């Protein structure tokens, strides 16, 4: 792992933290640090990751929560009810099937619920992350080499409109290298 990768992960979590509440579905949950960081805000937690061994260990470590190993490009999310908060921190840029991914999120979101996404900006991905990975500052395996789609602000607004979502918050952080997007489920359909 690059020397700054863990720092970036903590910063993404901290940037999204004030929007986490209620029932939470986290895609790309990794070590499920969200559970401990935001325990007082979470009433129910479901974590999904592609790493089956990690998911098995999480089931042992957190038996009161649910964990699933899934391929977010093709699998259907488990029928665990609707969620107040869906987290996908540094995930969307790794997904080939963007439409399927977003449809799964919207289908599992309560009316008025929020989808919280973080992803590199074009500047962060194409310049800073690329250079940092070459210097060993950022993880190149499972990171830069796996980035499929890089969003910009306009693309998030277009995607939100297509999915009947509202961009409640859009902002960049880490000197414009990453972006936070909070999408709110519109309760009225078009």
Image (spheres, rainbow, N blue to C red):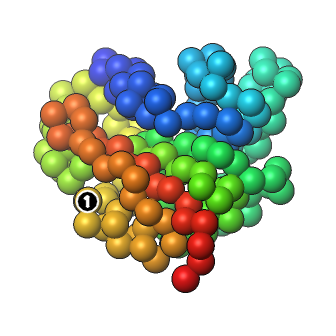
Dot 1, how many residues are within 10 Å of its Cα: few (below 14), some (14-19), or many (20+)?
Answer: some
**Any part of residue 181 in sight:** yes
Answer above or below: position of 135 versus 179.
Answer: above
- The residue indicated by pointer 1 is 152
Above or below — where is 169 with respect to 177? below
**What residue is drawn where x is 31% and y is 18%?**
3
Quadrant of the drawing holding the N terminus: top left
- Residue 26, horizontal then vertical, whole percent: 62, 41
Position of residue 54 measured from the top left corner of the image (x, y, whole percent): 69, 30
> For the C terminus, which image quadrant?
bottom right
User: Which image quarter: residue 69?
Assistant: top right
* Residue drawn at x 60%, y 51% as measured from the top left: 113
Residue furthest to the bottom in view is 190
- Indicate whether 91 appears above or below 188: above
Looking at this view, is 36 or 20 the one in front? 20
Residue 74 location (% of width, % of height): 66, 66
Q: Nearer the viewer, residue 122 or 154?
A: 154
Q: Residue 52, can we see it?
A: no
Image check: 79 left or right of 23? Answer: right
Please give left or right for residue 170 compared with residue 60 in the image. left
Taking the image as shown, residue 6 lies to the left or right of residue 3, namely right
Q: Residue at x 71, y 39 (%)?
A: 23
- Residue 64: image quadrant is top right
Which residue sits at x=27%, y=45%? Answer: 171
Q: For numbered disc 1, what is the local secondary structure? A: loop
């Amino acid at each position: 792992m690059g020397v700054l990768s863990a720092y970036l992960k903590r910063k993404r979590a901290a940037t999204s933290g004030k929007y986490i509440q209620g029932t939470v579905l986290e895609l790309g949950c990794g070590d499920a640090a969200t559970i401990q960081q935001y325990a007082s805000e979470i009433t129910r937690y479901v974590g999904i990751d592609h790493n089956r061994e990690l998911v098995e260990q999480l089931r042992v470590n957190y038996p009161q929560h649910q964990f699933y190993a899934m391929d977010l490009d093709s699998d259907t999310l488990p029928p665990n009810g609707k969620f107040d908060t869906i987290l996908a921190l540094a995930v969307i840029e790794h997904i080939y099937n963007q439409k399927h991914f977003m449809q799964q999120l919207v289908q599992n979101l309560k009316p008025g619920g929020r989808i919280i996404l973080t992803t590199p900006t074009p500047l962060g991905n194409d310049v800073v992350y690329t250079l940092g990975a070459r210097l060993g500052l950022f993880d190149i395996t499972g990171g830069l080499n796996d980035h499929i789609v890089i969003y910009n602000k306009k693309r998030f607004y277009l995607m939100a409109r297509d999915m009947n979502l509202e961009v409640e918050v859009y902002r960049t952080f880490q000197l414009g290298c990453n972006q936070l997007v909070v999408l709110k489920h519109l309760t009225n359909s078009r």
